[in-house]
Amino acid sequence: MSDVIVIGGGVIGTSIAYHLARDGANVTLLDQAFDAATKPAATWASAGGLRSQGRHAEDQPITKLAAARWKTLSEELDADLEASFGGHLHIAEIESEVPVIEQRFASDTAAGLPIERVEGNRLRAIAPALTENAIVGAYTAGDGQAHPGRTARAFARAAARLGTKTIFGQAATVKMDGGKASGVVLADGTILSSDQLILATGAWSIDLLSKLGIALPLRWRGLQMLLSDMAEKMLAPTVTAVGRNLSLKQTPSGEFMIGGRWIAAPAPTGIGSNCVDAHVARQWSGAAAVLPALRSRKLAQAWSGVEAQSIDSLPFIGRTRIGGLYLAAGFSNHGFQISPQIGACVASDILTGQEPLLAPFAPHRHDGIDPAKVATFVAEPIAC
Ligand SMILES: Cc1cc2nc3c(=O)[nH]c(=O)nc-3n(C[C@H](O)[C@H](O)[C@H](O)COP(=O)(O)OP(=O)(O)OC[C@H]3O[C@@H](n4cnc5c(N)ncnc54)[C@H](O)[C@@H]3O)c2cc1C
């Protein structure tokens, strides 16, 4: 019998398993796929941006701690996470967008984040290849990028070195006894017992929870990503723009990776998604408007992965109404940066019974919410 069973081998589940094992727990980590972070999980698809600016106030304490963790995480996990720290730059391209930069600068400064307001020569020095239309930016020098799949697999391997039992390739369902979660049933009928179960099952959580009679204001969406062919190094920071659905970075090997909440079409059945050609074209042209060098590059790959999104864009982390069932899902397109610290906080919450930094994310914080509001959120059109 394990002290804790973690269901889900994305970056959240693997980070939780690693931190629990590091803190002395006897852990079993499960995933339905044959490895951690596989298609179409959010971690597999993720852009891997480590952005600490522009976060929700509730996220900021964990974001700050996570930003510090990322600096030494490769060493800690003894793995190459392809982490680099060229900063993050959020730009305004027209005068009417400038107040958004001023607002972000003011609120992040007030929260104690080392953020700089940049323009003119300073902005050009940070990102010389960007469009001259970039008139002002908010810059966080310590931000960067890492490889999400490598990170999840590194957490899983580090957890295994600490004694975690990993079982991949079998979907798990929650086993209930006397109104409490008592373990899991694997696809081959194996029963594993534990009185602490953590659901870190991303987009799949909605269905798993609904089978247990728990309805939270969650939905899932496919989000698409593009990758260019390889280019000479010209872009150090990761870049977002006030007026565009855009996240742009150059990977350590030279490709440009383009994201920015572009919605993919849901697969005809089950949980999965496919890129939408019209969105691919607009996603690429928006990025090329910000980085003109992209006009002479080719699209090398396009993919999409599924992410659970909550009604307030904050994750659901904590004990559910069902005894023994803990939830960590709904990371709403920004779970990768905070993943190391989420693992540490959940381990502390499970093992000590409390973790104040997780208080804003309580799973039942929306109980009593108007069902019509939830229905509108869930049914929101799949368009950009
Ligand atoms: C396209 C895209 C770009 C993104 N870019 C960024 C970014 O730049 N920066 C950032 O901070 N965040 C980003 N995010 C968000 C971030 O990647 C996610 O928040 C994070 O990866 C969520 O991880 P997870 O472990 O919760 O979910 P997932 O990675 O989806 O993992 C869930 C796992 O649970 C497993 N599972 C489900 N059901 C079962 C079951 N019944 N039994 C066993 N296993 C099961 C699945 O197989 C899966 O492996 C992005 C997300 C997407 C989709």
Image: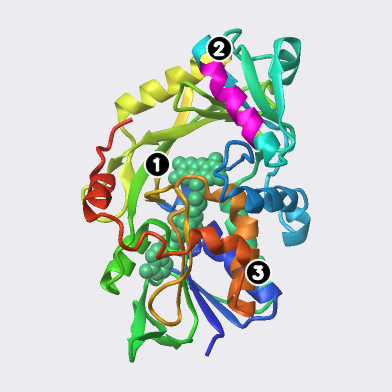
Q: Which residues are magenta?
A: 97-107
| Residue 32 picture quarter | bottom left
Q: Which residue is mark 1?
A: 304
Q: Main secondary structure of the magenta part?
A: helix
Q: Is residue 142 magenta?
A: no
Looking at marks 1 and 3 on the same chain, the residue that comes earlier in the sequence is marked by 3
Q: Which residue is mark 2?
A: 292
**Disc 1, SS:** strand
- CA gap, disc 2 and disc 1: 24 Å
Q: Nearer the viewer, residue 370 or 292?
A: 370
What's the residue type where badge 2 is placed?
A: Pro
Which residue sits at x=45%, y=19%?
286
In this rendering, would 240 be left or right of 146?
left
Looking at marks 3 and 2 on the same chain, the residue that comes earlier in the sequence is marked by 3
Spot the residue most to the top. Answer: 132
Q: Give neighbour class at mark 2: few <14, some 14-19, many 20+ (Cα, 10 Å).
A: some
What's the residue type where badge 1 is placed?
A: Ser
Disc 1 to disc 3: CB gap under 8 Å? no
Q: Give neighbour class at mark 1: few <14, some 14-19, many 20+ (Cα, 10 Å).
A: many
Looking at marks 2 and 1 on the same chain, the residue that comes earlier in the sequence is marked by 2
Q: Nearer the viewer, residue 70 or 303?
A: 70
Q: Note whether residue 73 is visible.
A: yes
Q: Nearer the viewer, residue 199 or 361?
A: 361
Q: Is residue 13 above or below residue 291?
A: below
Label 3 beta carbon less than 8 Å to ligand 1: no
**Disc 2, SS:** helix
